[in-house]
Amino acid sequence: MITPPEPLARCIAEVQQALAQPAPHAAVGAALARLVARDDWLPPAYAQPHPAHYQQYLLHADPAGRFSIVSFVWGPGQATPIHDHGIWGAVGQLRGAEHAQAYTADGTTPPRPIGPPHTLLPGAVELIGPEVHDIHKVANAGAGVSVSIHIYGTNIGTHPRHVYPEAGGIKPFISGYANGPDTPAFVG
């Protein structure tokens, strides 16, 4: 683990302060908005796409397990399956653009879209989780690499979640991380 860039260190401190509040979700979203308002702090190693699928890099995991900050990196045409989180979160667009489509799903019937998809552009932040909308599909909206920064109320790479196949059903999954020896998590 290594020391985070200053903007990320400031965001970590702001999230720690927000978690002392009774309802931290909005304050976490505001901290994330300040982080993604500038695109000069993420080291290139944490923004490398994979040719076949999106990548999720752990940037910081709170030692007490209260939150994690990750970068999601998308190559052209890459998308998630329809999935849930089971915990509060915030997504901030750092570069490129992403389409997000909310769904309703119960595992017994095919997932159904809720409203039209929307596009996240650089600097945009949206809140996700059981109290907002917890099931969605996300895709790179452009021809280049897209990078978004996510903050979750747990270590999301180790948190049990679900995928909802388009034909119906439900499958458990744990996402893990793409970090390697050249991309250790930051200590804040």
Image: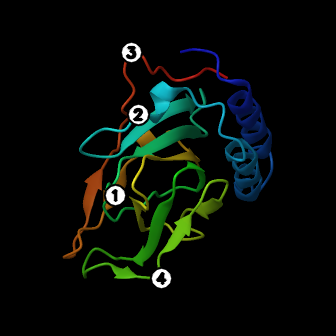
Judged from the image, the secondary structure of the residue bearing numbered disc 2 is loop
Residue that label 1 marks: 79
Q: CA distance from mark 3 to mark 4?
A: 40 Å
Q: CA distance from mark 2 to mark 3?
A: 14 Å
Residue that label 3 marks: 181
Tell me which amino acid carries mark 3.
Pro
Q: Are marks 2 and 1 in contact (CB under 8 Å)?
A: no
Q: Residue 152 location in percent, x, y?
A: 56, 47
Q: Residues within 10 Å of mark 1 (few under 14, many from 20)?
A: some
Judged from the image, the secondary structure of the residue bearing numbered disc 1 is loop
- For marks 1 and 4, the one nearer the N-term is 1
Could you tell me which residue is drawn at 73 percent across and 32 percent down? Answer: 7
Disc ID at residue 187: none
Q: CA distance from mark 1 to mark 4?
A: 17 Å
- For marks 1 and 3, the one nearer the N-term is 1
Q: CA distance from mark 2 to mark 1?
A: 16 Å
Number of the front mark, 2 or 3: 2
Tell me which amino acid carries mark 1.
Ala
- For marks 2 and 1, the one nearer the N-term is 2
Judged from the image, the secondary structure of the residue bearing numbered disc 3 is loop
Number of the front mark, 2 or 1: 2
Q: Quadrant of residue 162?
A: bottom left
Tell me which amino acid carries mark 4.
Pro
Q: Residue 48 location in percent, x, y?
A: 41, 33
Residue that label 2 marks: 48
Could you tell me which residue is drawn at 47 percent across and 58 percent down? Answer: 86
Tell me which amino acid carries mark 2.
Gln
Say whether residue 185 is left or right of residue 82.
right
Q: Are marks 1 and 4 in contact (CB under 8 Å)?
A: no
Residue that label 4 marks: 116
Q: Are marks 2 and 3 in contact (CB under 8 Å)?
A: no
